[in-house]
Image (spheres, coloured by chain):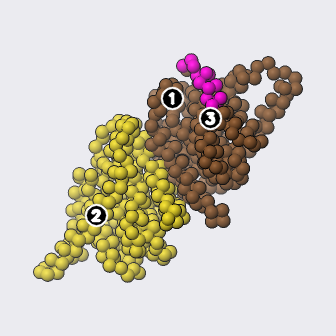
Chain colours: A yellow, B brown
Amino acid sequence: MASAHISISRINLSHRSISPGLSGKRRYTTIARVAQNQSYWESIQSDIDSHLKKAIPIREPLTVFEPMHHLTFSPPRTSASALCVAACELVGGNRADAIVAASAIHLMHADIYVHDNMLLTDRVEPRPTIPHKFEPQIELMTGDGIMPFGFELLAGSIDPASNNADKILRVIIEISRAIGSEAMVSDQDYEANIDQSSGQQIHRLHESGAACGAILGGGNEEEIERLKKFGLYAGKIQGLLNKMGKNEEGKIELIEKWRALALKELEHFDSKKIEEISSIVTGDSLKFSCVGN
Amino acid sequence: MASAHISISRINLSHRSISPGLSGKRRYTTIARVAQNQSYWESIQSDIDSHLKKAIPIREPLTVFEPMHHLTFSPPRTSASALCVAACELVGGNRADAIVAASAIHLMHADIYVHDNMLLTDRVEPRPTIPHKFEPQIELMTGDGIMPFGFELLAGSIDPASNNADKILRVIIEISRAIGSEAMVSDQDYEANIDQSSGQQIHRLHESGAACGAILGGGNEEEIERLKKFGLYAGKIQGLLNKMGKNEEGKIELIEKWRALALKELEHFDSKKIEEISSIVTGDSLKFSCVGN
């Protein structure tokens, strides 16, 4: 998948730029950490995929559920989903608390991806690629069904035993804002305008993913707010990486700036999970998010 | 608006067919009741519109909120929204308990309407009409933002004083199912196939509107289930009325059959509101739903 390869090479490039001249033991340790973090994100993604496969089985009527299954799993994964789980674990929550919200975020992302992939004929290269197994009308209708299904999953994750209704409603507000009018409201600052076409929705989905994870994991208000900002910077980096290749002037510097701002938000936390979640903006672990099914 | 006039004439026609030969006092009483019921639906619709106008003011940035406002208020109103309020009142709830859900249902309907109006070039006459003030791409993106905004409104209507979080989550499930995969799953029976093109979403939105109103009004499980069925028949009637004009063979009979089934569900209720809610399937009051802003 073209976009995946481009992102991976960019990430490796930017990783090298902040880790010059490694050798011997330090180099070995870095590689080991990279592998460990990579495995962390892969295990999260694997759990999200398993949940989605149970939630959207291929069943009768096939005319509905075959395209729905296809359009759910064909788009590349988004790191916004995994960030939701990582944020939950960072504040001390269990993975199971965030897995439904992470799955819902993937569904929102899939809906956006299907729309972008169909309609933006003037999109800047690299264009997203998705195998078109069905008629455009079917794909569009199915995309329209995927988004509400995400909300259905979320609302259905109420658990009287854990008295989580208030948290779920707050998560629904976060996600609906991320994909709704807030995503369409363009930031007026220069930085945002540079990568306008990468989509406010990518930023917002990461911002809301991190916030939702913190909410569901039982984080306090300050933790939620800090992880929300961390998610926003992670989303901005992801958005810019997705379209690296043209007009790169100033972009590497922007990524470095956002990365520093993101990492600053994590200073507040005292957890061994910091290294794992931070790797989403330091480079190597991002690549999982660009690999399709 | 063409579709409005066609629906009104059909409704009047069907009303005459079940009230032949009225004269004198009875005729006067019928007219008075019609006016009273009409005023009931109009007052509900007015309250829903007021709520929506507060929720979606025209504000900066105008590039986002002007099309959002336009696409919210341009489509004809749907009786599914008003049915939500009427069902709430029928089971003894207050109008205020259902007004947010009714507004959210209108937003879902507006999103569906914008999509239908843009994409179904092979639609059976009468085609829906909507003034196109903005570029198609803007209208489609705005439609995509309207649906999540409906969920945001719903989730935001949590009220700790009334401890309504569980009810709201159930309402979110009802509505997301109505506009999601369930709406795409075609009924396999003959009756449904007759009016396939009127859209399962119209049926489901009415079904869910009535169910949501009953849930929010504090109805018991039997009341919710009966009003859900009532809503489904009301939606089927509305869907068929929307496309009356071609292939009418058998349709009048179908409407009469669905109307009888709908009214049967109401026999369970002991409330002076029965007459008001029942008028949504007996004819005259339906016309409000076809009048644009």
Q: Callout 2, which amino acid?
A: Ser
- Chain bearing tag 1 is B
Q: Which residue is mark 2?
A: A43
Q: Indicate whether B2 appears above or below B201.
A: above
Give residue A144's quadrant in the image.
Answer: top left
- Chain bearing tag 2 is A
Q: Callout 3, which amino acid?
A: Ala
Q: Which stretch did the figure color magenta? A: B247-261
| Residue B134 falls inside the magenta stretch | no
CB under 8 Å between discs 3 and 1: no
Q: Callout 1, which amino acid?
A: Ala
Q: Which residue is mark 3?
A: B234
Q: Which residue is mark 1?
A: B192
Residue A30 image offset from top left, x and y in percent? 20, 76
Q: Secondary structure at mark 3?
A: helix
Residue appearing at x 46%, y 58% in the figure: A157
Q: Are tags 3 and 1 found on a single chain?
A: yes
Cα gap from disc 3 to disc 2, whole angstroms = 48 Å
Q: Residue furthest right?
A: B25
| Residue B256 falls inside the magenta stretch | yes
